[in-house]
Image (tube, grey):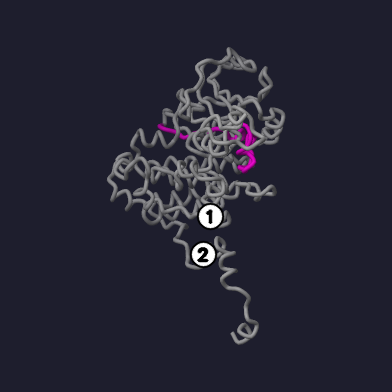
Amino acid sequence: MADMNRCARCGATLPPRQGEGESCPRCLLALGLSTGFASLGGAKGASSSDEVPSDFPDSIGGFGILDTLGEGGTGVVYLAEQTQPVRRKVALKVVRAGLSSREVLARFETERQALALLSHPGIAKVLDAGTAEDGRAFFAMEWVPGVPITEHCDRERLTTVQRLELLVEVCEAVQHAHAEGVTHGEIKPSNVLVTEEDEGPRPKILDLGVARALGERLTAEALYSAQGLLSGTPSYVAPEQITVTPAGPSEGDARADVYALGVLLYELLAGAPPFEARRLRQAGWAEMVQVIQQEEPPRPSARVTTLEGTSASEVAVRRRTEPRRLIKELRGDLDWIALKALEKDRSRRYQSAYDLGLDIRRLLRHEPVTARPASLRSLLGKALRRYRRQFARRRGPVDPKRRSRS
């Protein structure tokens, strides 16, 4: 009986309500950190260390299946062929069993009209949605033969300026979606692929509308559910997107996408996100929430020297420079732009993807940027918010006589 209550991945003891073959909260969190649809539109390959199954059905929902593109926590993505009303290749995302197809499609339907208005070269279109023969929901999307933006930049050894120019294009595409009332909710490298076109490399955003249809707030309860229910990737999740109590914080708005763009900018600059995925993966739930919601990220220029598994020299070489010059490039305005996008308090972030992109354009034109080092008042405010209870205990009751004399 004891074996039936052990994690299928690491052997840890499971909560009583979980059964044989399920995973513990830590392994589920690791799954949420390491999986996704990294090859959604591009070359074949899994986004995790597990190999993608080579066997696949002949057809799903009238789409002929050609190959497996990737597998993640919420399902499998196939390369498929559509024959009616037009013949074309598509990326077919089939939601895993266990997620309510009716609920997923209902959430998607609320955004479908807005999605139909999206027409931007930087956004991959969602072409269709429906239910497969086995009852699972599926989404047919434009097939983008590309690779994640971070992989493209490193492979091509793009300079910092070239990386910033690509990110500005991503900001413009996100702003277009926001203007039509569509937010993403899960912007990360595997959802921003770069494809080669006649005009040169172009970043394309995947999963707009689909991510929200599949999305559930990141909760401790989700960790005890079926594998892969974690819809967000903690390294890219905004603080307000995490639910700590049943009531939870307010839902993320467009500024949650701005935060994710800030993490993407940070990774393009420094070679890694602000907080190591490995650290979040190994942390307990409470510690992970504390890091995301309270811990201030280091400046990108400082982060370069503290990377795990790589060196500052390797990061610099991928940007066609050397460590001291890279740190000098990042120090100052780029540090402040990234940190403003990553503000814990969303009222202090860039208020739109347009504003973030505009400040990057100002920097590229050698103009003054709006991001500036935090003032002493702001820093004190952050400290007070973080340690409010500790400060309250230390101060104790105020003497009325002392107050009147002051």
Say whether residue 360 is left or right of residue 89: left
**Above or below 31: residue 389:** below
* Circle 1 crowding by C-alpha within 10 Å: few under 14, some 14–19, many from 20: some
Task: Give the residue at x 55% y 65%.
Answer: 384
- Tag shown at residue 17: none
Task: Give the residue at x 33% y 37%.
Answer: 157
Q: How far across and how far down the image is residue 40, in percent?
A: 51, 27
Q: How far across and how far down the image is residue 382, in percent?
A: 53, 62
Verify whether residue 28 appears in magenta: no
Q: Which amino acid does label 1 sit on?
A: Gln
- Tag shown at residue 294: 1
Q: How far across and how far down the image is residue 33, in percent?
A: 51, 38
Residue position for label 2: 378
Of all residues, the one furthest to the front in this rendering is 1
Q: How many marks?
A: 2
Say whether residue 63 is left or right of residue 30: right
Image quarter where the C terminus lies is bottom right
**Residue 183 visible to an observer of this rendering:** yes
Label 1 SS: helix
Image quarter where the N terminus lies is top right
Question: Which quadrant of the view contains residue 20?
Answer: top right
* Circle 2 crowding by C-alpha within 10 Å: few under 14, some 14–19, many from 20: few
Label 2 SS: helix
**Above or below 390: residue 155:** above
Write the start and end of the magenta stretch as one range: 200-226
Verify whether residue 211 appears in magenta: yes
